[in-house]
Amino acid sequence: MQNTPDHQGASPGAIRSVVVAGGGTAGWMAATYLAARLEGRGITITVLESHEIGTIGVGEATVPAIRDFFRMIGLHDFDVLRATGGTPKLGIDFAGWGGEDTRFFHPFGLYGLSSRGVPFHQYWLKLAHGGLVRDLGDYSLCTEMACNGAFMLPVDNPVNDLAVFDWAVHFDASRFAAMLRDLGQQRGVRLIDDVITRAVRDGETGHITSLETRGGLSIAGDLFIDCTGFRALLLGEAMGSAWVDWTDMLPCDRAVAMPCAASGGFDQPYTTSTARKAGWQWRIPLQHRVGNGYVYSSAHISDDEAAATLRAHLEGEALAEPNLIRFGAGHRREFWRGNCIGVGLAAGFLEPLESTSITLIQTALEKLVDLFPNCACDPALADEFNRATTLEYERIRDFLILHYHANGRHGEALWDHMRAAPPPEKLAHKLSLWRARGKLVRYEWEAFFDPSWLSMYAGFGIMPAAHDPMADHFTDQQVVEALDHMREAIRAAAAHARPARDFLARLAPQASRA
Ligand code: FDA
């Protein structure tokens, strides 16, 4: 049977109109993604946003999957970098998390080479257990480039199998939303600028039938995507999906953000996360400015002190007044209820320690298309969406908690509390297997794979009691030689990378490549 190319042959009850409430990063990612994936099916897409209300205005660091999103909606990485003042990101530099004056790097890439089915890190552990301690970062091209302030595209990496890495981007969130708005409108997405006052529901099914606006409009639709940010006007307010609160596990509940001028130009192709007394500070380098923010627990520091701390640590002139943002960690119990799906902050939030909110928008949209309903919205589809998304949130939550649980900052109330708090069950299981024999465990719907967990364990100095005995089929001397060889190969590959600012300078409009 052939796929139906347009709506003429669509089955009765097929979705004909999708209404996206909210035009922040989530709303425009939803509109452009659905326009691309649903093309030719005769489905109209409407975005209802309000310039009066505006967007949250933060959310500038991503993970590599964002580049798949660009491709899916027909954008080239370089177009995004140019239009948004963006820069490449190789990972995150964690400063002060293991104690003042410590730092380690979480790279977007692999460490070393496995051999005989035994993961690389088991050989690295074998040497450490024999007193031959090596810096794990020496076996990561990504880390090596980041340390050098250098960048190249993975296709320019001359040592492919050994030095596998990926990259993400930093971008100006408002420029990104504007870029997607233009693209969406070019692709036929209808834009309405008005304030939503009410969601009207069908008395029998409970489905949303239309959104009423302050301007007197009534926008009807078959499927509603709630992208109204923390307000969650549709999923939370109208549909009553309860909030699952995780602030006991992740107590940071506020952020103060303040961009500043870049000192000395762009030379750090990575995000920096610096631990502070009551939380941590982000640094996100863009072409035209640096994004900064202090994420903190309001139980441990006042707003004024947090703002003063951030201001004191800016590298250049502040470009705006401090922007105070309140939030809580958690998510809606049901991400999809009836004919309403929450995406972005309307669905949930985890502090931006690993830049995961935008990737959660992306995976929500991928899952939605995978489970795309008809007008009946069979609850089985929603159940699967909710099951998978809950797991995804829990996995990320646990990865974030590890950062706090393993901290080495003694004598500061927040950090002492987080070290003492028992880890959630799945994280405790992972930690016990790592501590026993360096075993890395991956569950379904993990956003972070083995190298990310390894970077944390090694970065925090959590060393297992033993290594995999299978690594013992090589002698220490053989492993030393193999690892030395890998380190040299990675250094040689890194020498091909150029200063990161040169990479940006080469992003002239005609420099696009396939
Ligand atoms: P957002 O609030 O931006 O948009 C909501 C939209 O709904 C707006 O268009 C608004 O006008 C509209 N709206 C609301 N009520 C309405 C009404 N009644 N009528 C009409 N329209 C209405 N993520 C990440 O991946 N990397 C990062 O580095 C960070 N950093 C970060 C820092 C901090 C402090 C926070 C709080 C969050 C982040 N995030 C992040 C998360 C990121 O900011 C977020 O995921 C995206 O910006 C998406 O936001 P939304 O579009 O969901 O909400």
Image (cartoon, helix red, strand yellow):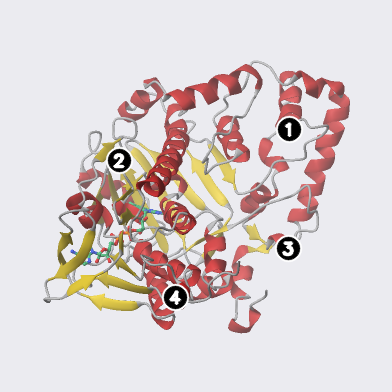
Which image quarter holds the N terminus? bottom right
Total numbered badges shown on the rendered structure: 4
Give the CA separation, mark 4 to mark 3.
40 Å
Instruction: Please tell me which of labels 4 and 3 falls first in the chain.
Output: 4
Residue situated in front as seen by the camera: 201 or 477: 201
The label on residue 7 is: 4
**Quarter, ligand 1:** bottom left
Residue 141: x %, y % from top left:
70, 49
Mark 3 residue's CB less than 8 Å from ligand 1: no
Residue 266: x %, y % from top left:
53, 64
Instruction: Please tell me which of labels 2 and 3 falls first in the chain.
Output: 3
Instruction: Please tell me which of labels 1 and 3 falls first in the chain.
Output: 1
- Crowd class of label 3 (few under 14; some 14 to 19; many from 20; radius 10 Å): few
Q: Is residue 474 left or right of residue 29?
A: right
Report the amino acid beneath label 1.
Pro
Instruction: Please tell me which of labels 2 and 1 falls first in the chain.
Output: 1
Would you place residue 245 above or below residue 430 in this image?
below
The label on residue 155 is: 3
Q: Is residue 17 left or right of residue 238?
A: right
Q: Which residue is mark 1?
A: 119
Would you place residue 170 above or below residue 465 in this image?
below
Residue 139: x %, y % from top left:
72, 41
Give the CA separation, mark 2 to mark 4.
34 Å
Is residue 311 visible to us here? no
Report the amino acid beneath label 4.
His
Question: Mark 4, mark 1: which one is toward the viewer?
Answer: 4
Residue situated in front as seen by the camera: 285 or 514: 514
Instruction: Please tell me which of labels 2 and 4 falls first in the chain.
Output: 4
Question: Mark 2, mark 4: which one is toward the viewer?
Answer: 4
Give the CA separation, mark 1 to mark 3.
24 Å
The label on residue 333 is: 2
